[in-house]
Image (cartoon, rainbow, N blue to C red):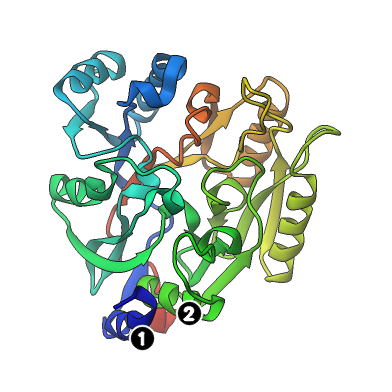
Amino acid sequence: MSVINRMPDLVRACMTLKTIKLIPEWASQDILWVGWPCVQEYWGDQFEPAQAQIAQFIRALAPRISVQVGVQSDGDMAKARLACGPDCDIRKVSMGDIWFRDTGPIFAQIDGALTGLQFGFNGWGGKYVMAGDEATGADMLAASGYAAARHEFVLEGGAVDFDGAGRLMTTRACVLNPNRNSWTESQAEAALKGAFGVREIIWLDQGLAGDHTDGHVDNIARFIGAGRVVCQTASGDNDPNRAVYADIQRDLAAAGLDVISIPSPGKVLNMDGAFMAASHLNFVFANGLVIMPRYDAVYSEQARLALASALPGHEVIALDAGHILTGGGSFHCISQQIPVPTTQQPSLGEMT
């Protein structure tokens, strides 16, 4: 039986749960998982430079949060230990590569218990099917000691963002793409509301030019508070996403959100001259620290200052991420947080 034919049963099963609480990323976190590059033929000559940038990212995180680095082999474990230092926990997990935001679980409190929500994964619509990715989430949960709640429809963590107050943001280009699920917008909304316990789905249309994920939302808009969202404005006359950014700002404002904009990285090309999906929004929260990807000396510093202004009480730093970007993403894409359980977030029935 297809996932779509089973959708009513799946949604009913989800809704029988008493409470589903999503804890936003700026809340207290217990652990941050980070993936370590392990497939050299995938990265080519960017393999070691990407490892170096990820090691710098991990070292910056270590004073604020317990970092668990996921590796594929004993050899990778030794190399990661040497590069990242003693203040992180290295764990062997099944993995095709480092994109834990998409292959790992999304944590929520279900009836008060922190639980890993797991979804189907098909290599970003069949484009990058790598052995081990389908088992990454289960291995992360086993290593962390949390139970799983399984949903059969295909969904990557980078495709959704939530504010902890009943809103979930996503894109039609990715979530309604037939290379994931053969469903309508209304069917998708029912499934997402059932799985995550949210009351409102905010739809954006397109993602960035050159985005291999078909338009993940964590590259184009991020919640930074309840009903408060940050997006980007075009930088430079040749920014390939100028029209996309304008549409995003319009749609976020139309949804009644408090919209803040920071500069984009502008036009970023790979060695073959193709657009790369560089985004300053692929940042990571870590217990009062925000680490933003840096791609140049001008636009990235402007974006860092704007983001710091929007996040008082947080330390916002920028770290080089150009080599990581050659693999298709940045800091948010390679990480997945385990939040500190809380009783302060409203349940579905308490949301206003």
Q: Within 10 Å of the Cα at label 2, are there few (<14), some (14-19), or many (20+) other Cα atoms?
A: some
Residue 348 spot, x, y in % from top left: 40, 79
Q: Where is mark 2, residue-wise?
A: 187
Above or below, 105 against 290 in this view is below
Picture layout, residue 48 above or below residue 113: above
In percent of width and height, residue 221 lies at 61, 52
Q: Is there any visible trace of residue 285 in the rendered image?
A: yes
Image quarter hosting the N terminus: bottom left
Do tag 2 and tag 1 residues touch (Cβ < 8 Å)?
no
Kindly state the secondary structure of the residue where label 2 is placed.
helix
Q: Residue at x 14, y 44 (%)?
A: 143
Residue shown at the point (77%, 62%) measured from the top left: 250
Amino acid type shown at disc 2 = Gln
Mark toward the start of the polypeptide (2 vs 1): 1
Q: Residue 22's x, y, as percent?
A: 38, 65
Residue 293 at x, y percent in the picture? 55, 31
Instruction: Examine the image and state in which quarter residue 292 appears.
Output: top right
Depth check, front residue: 60 or 170: 170
- Residue 337, numbered label: none
Query: At label 1, which amino acid type do we have?
Result: Pro
Q: Is residue 288 visible?
A: no
Specify the quadrant of the image occupied by residue 318.
top right
Tag 1 secondary structure: helix
What residue do we see at 18% from left, 33% from top?
91
Using the numbered discs, state the Cα–Cα distance from disc 2 to disc 1 in whole angstroms.
9 Å
Of residues 240 and 57, the one nearer the viewer is 240
> Which quarter of the figure has residue 121?
bottom left
Q: Read off the residue under disc 1.
A: 8
